Amino acid sequence: MRIACILIHNLAVQSALAGDRSLHGQPLVIGGLPFEAKPVYDASPEAMACGVGVGMPLREAYAFCAGAKFLPLEEARYEQVFEQVVDVLEKFSPVIDIEKLGCAYIDISGVRDETNLCQDVFKNISADTGLSACLGVSSGKFFSHIAAFTSKPEVPIILSPGQEKDFVAPFSVDFFPCSSESKERLYLLGIRFIGELPRFSKEALIAQFGSDGPLMHDLAHGIDGSPLVGRPKREAVADSIRLDSPAVSFIEILQACEVMLGRLFARVNGQGKLCREVALRLGFVSGVSEEWRLVLKEPTTSSRLILSRLQTWLETIRLPSQVVEVGLSLSLTKEQAKKLLFWPEKHKRSKELLRAVMELKLRFGYQPIKKSRVVNPQPILPERRFTLTDVLE
C-alpha cells in the first residue's frame, strides 16, 4: 500500500489570510482579543518569531508581540475550509482517512507517477481553497506523517519502499504514537532517537513498555501495518422553494428554510442519521445563484438549531439583490455513540450531557435520561430509597 499524508500547517492562519489579503505579512494571533482569558489557538510565523506560542494566554502573547493582529476563533469556518480540502482529495482517491482537522491520509496505491500526483494535489488545493499544503508519501501512515510534517509547503517528500527505516532513524522518539508514560520511560533509559531502538529485541521492548513495545519495534524497523479507515460516503438530501414574491430580507428566507427542513427531516426520520453540514443556495432576480456551506459544530436533527445557525449567518451578509428561490441541502452522517463525562465536578453539570439531553428531548418529546435522587434515607424497603427524576430539573 502507498499512502499520502496531506498536512495543512497553521490552518486557522491560512484561512484568515485567504479571506483577507491585507493581512499578508502581518503577525497574526488567532484565539480572541488580548484581554480575553483564552489561549492562543494559532499564530503566524511572524508572531511566532516574536515568541508567541500556541496554547499560551492571549495576554502573554500580547506582551511578546503587541503589534500583532488578534483575530477571534472561528472553528466552524476552519472545519468548512478543511472540508473543501477533503472534497479536493476525493478527486484523487476513493479512500480518505481524516486523522484530525488539517491532517488527512489517502490511498494512492497503483499510481505510477507519484510526483505528478503530488503536484496535482497541491495545485487543486491551492486553486479551490487558497491554502498551502505539505505532503509526504510512503508505505505507512506513520512515515507519511513524519515526511509531511518535515517537508516544505508544496515540496513533497516521497519515500520509496524500504527507505522508511533509515528515514525515521534520526527523529525523536516523541513522534511515536504511544503513551506519555512510555515516552518518559524511553528518556529515563537514555533513548532519544528512533534509530536507537532496532538494537533491542521485540521481547525486551514488550517487557519494558507492555503493549507499546511491539508498536515501537515495528515502527523503528520501518514497518507500519496501520490500516486506512476511510470515512463513509456522505449522503445528502436537498429541497428548494420558489418564492411567491422576491425576498428582500432574511426573514422570508428563514421561513422557506423552516419549511424545507421539516420536509427533509421527514424523509430521513427513523434512519438514525444526523445533519453535519448545511448548504444554502439563493437564486436572485438577475438569474445568478450562489451557494454557501455551513459546517455545524456537532451533528444534529434539530431544525431549531440549524435555523438559529442560518439566522446568525444571514444577519451578517448583505444580499446583492432580491431572492426568488431558496435551496437547501443537508449532508448526512450516521449517528454514533458518544461517551460523555456526566458529572466532571461536584455540583456542576456537564455541558455535553445537557446538550445531548436537549437533543433527545427535541427528537422524542421526552427526556429518556434520568438521574436518581434520595427521597428516604432509611426506608422500610430498599427500592424506595431513590426515585428517578429528569436530568434538567
Image (cartoon, grey):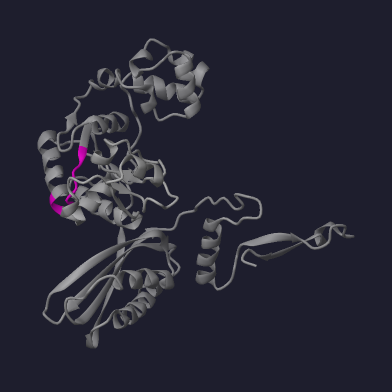
Residue 57, placed above or below residue 336 = above
Residue 105, placed above or below residue 208 = below
Residue 174, placed above or below residue 322 = above
Which quadrant would the C terminus be assigned to in this image? bottom right
Residue at point 26%, 17% (across, down): 166
Residue at point 21%, 45% (across, down): 93
State the image quarter where residue 123 is shown. Answer: top left
Residue 251 locus on image (x, y percent): 32, 82
Residue 117 locus on image (x, y percent): 13, 39
Residue 130 locus on image (x, y percent): 16, 51
State the image quarter where residue 309 is shown. Answer: bottom left
State the image quarter where residue 183 is shown. Answer: top left
Residue at point 15%, 43% (across, down): 121
Residue 129 counted in the magenta span: yes
Q: Which residues are magenta?
A: 127-134
Indicate left or right for 387 with 289 as reference.
right
| Viewer-nearest residue: 21 or 80 | 21
Residue at point 34%, 42% (across, down): 229
Residue 55 locus on image (x, y percent): 40, 41
Task: Give the residue at the far top of this rendering.
Answer: 199
Which quadrant would the N terminus be assigned to in this image? top left
| Viewer-nearest residue: 370 or 313 | 313
